[in-house]
Amino acid sequence: MKIITEQEIQQLRAETKGTAQRIHFNNAGSSLPPDVVVDTVIDYLQEEAILGGYETEFKYKDQLEYTYNLIAKLINSGKDEIALVENASIAWGLVFHGIDFNEGDEIITTEMEYVTNLIGFINMRKTHGVILHIIPNDEQGNFMLSALEAAISPKTKLIAVTHIPSTAGGMIPIVEIGKIARKHRILYLVDACQTAGQAPIDVEAIGCDMLAVTGRKYLRAPRGTGFLYVRKNMQDKFKLLFMDGFSTPTISQTDYKVRPDARRFELYEKNRAITLGLGKAVEYALNIGVDRIWQRVQFLADALRQQLTAIDGITVHDMGDEKCGIVTFSVSGIDSPAVKARLFEQNINVSVGLAKSTLIYMDKHHLTSIVRASVHYYNTKEEIETLCNALITIVC
């Protein structure tokens, strides 16, 4: 595998207007989109305004359809296993709330689970009497696979994990968890919100039944885009929360029949312009090579962690043997929102990770908030040095 060269980086930055304006380390929130993605969305909207909404959709029907092909290639699935939705939370909720839970059913999750998913678990416990088991990480920050297997019982109905958490730089071993889920024939739901576009995803290797993804983060797609993967032989097992003439194309006055593919989870009306933008963003990542992107992201994140660790007054909080492009830290004596604000004044974007975003993990480590700097392949070593120099002035 060839690394992304410095010449390529400069070309990729030239194709992203935002990199000339600011140093953007908020890719885990919303990456800077490539210019081609922005142009694709704007050009479509301009045609829609002149030609008409339905008429423009018909004109671009092949390109819109091809978005499913591109996503299928990205995650190694069938195109009939993909549904387009607004974001990962919608994708996750469509399948989670479509499961027929009964009192006493058990869900297993991790301490790194995202707030939206945790709310879903708590709601299911309150309304259906479902039991939630949380598998903690060990002292080194690694997920304990042996504890997962020990927690499985005849009542275990679902294993649900977030691959890359919102407010930590570690990662959950989703492939190894998938092997355990398959062995025990347990439904397996993966939140890959931060993964897509950052690290390779292969749903066959993972062995998940469902996977939720958003577009605006590492995929560099427009906000309001995302997709849901549901394994073909599992699609009939979920209740549909919403239906319309698109999801149920066959209907009589007494009955209806849902689509035979994952698009049963979609509704007809959606933003076609950003659908094309999502497809263009996926294509852009595939053209670079997700393996190459992942190598570059890990390189930059490791460099950032090393430099931050060398600064007195800064504590890096990332744990675990495998880490991602999210780097979390705190500054002694200065709260995280103040750090973010002072960096913003110097044209540097970072974000603040709140305790509720990854509540169990943050409570465990007595953290109320952290600074989150998330790198992407278009970031540079010089930008990392600029960030660290800015932090040194803040600490002093």
Image (tube, rainbow, N blue to C red):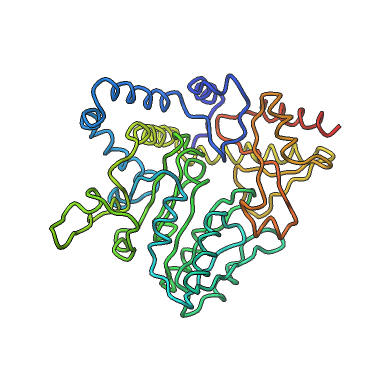
Q: Residue furthest left?
A: 252
Number of numbered labels in the structure image: 0
Q: In the rendered view, does 135 fall on the left or right side of 59?
A: right
The answer to which quarter of the image holds residue 41 is top left
**Relative vertical location of residue 189 with respect to residue 170 in this rendering, above or below:** below
Choose top left, top right, bottom left or bottom right for residue 252. bottom left
Q: Pinpoint residue 327: horizontal percent, then vertical percent.
A: 66, 43
In the image, is 390 to the left or to the right of 178? right
Q: Nearer the viewer, residue 311 or 226?
A: 226
Q: Name the residue at 36% across, 26% down.
A: 40
Residue at 42%, 40% in the rendered image: 225
Residue placed most toward the observer, 344 or 314: 344
Q: Residue at x 50, y 23 (%)?
A: 16
Residue 87 in percent (x, y) is at: 44, 45
Q: Position of residue 353 (x, y in %)?
A: 65, 45
The percent coordinates of residue 92 (x first, y second) are: 44, 55
x 82%, y 28%: residue:
393
- Judge whether 49 appears above or below 285 on screen: above
The C terminus appears in which quarter of the rendering? top right
Farthest residue toward the bottom? 154
The quadrant in which residue 253 appears is: bottom left
> Is residue 65 shown above or below 192?
above
The furthest residue to the right: 396
Is residue 353 found left or right of 278 in the rendered image?
right
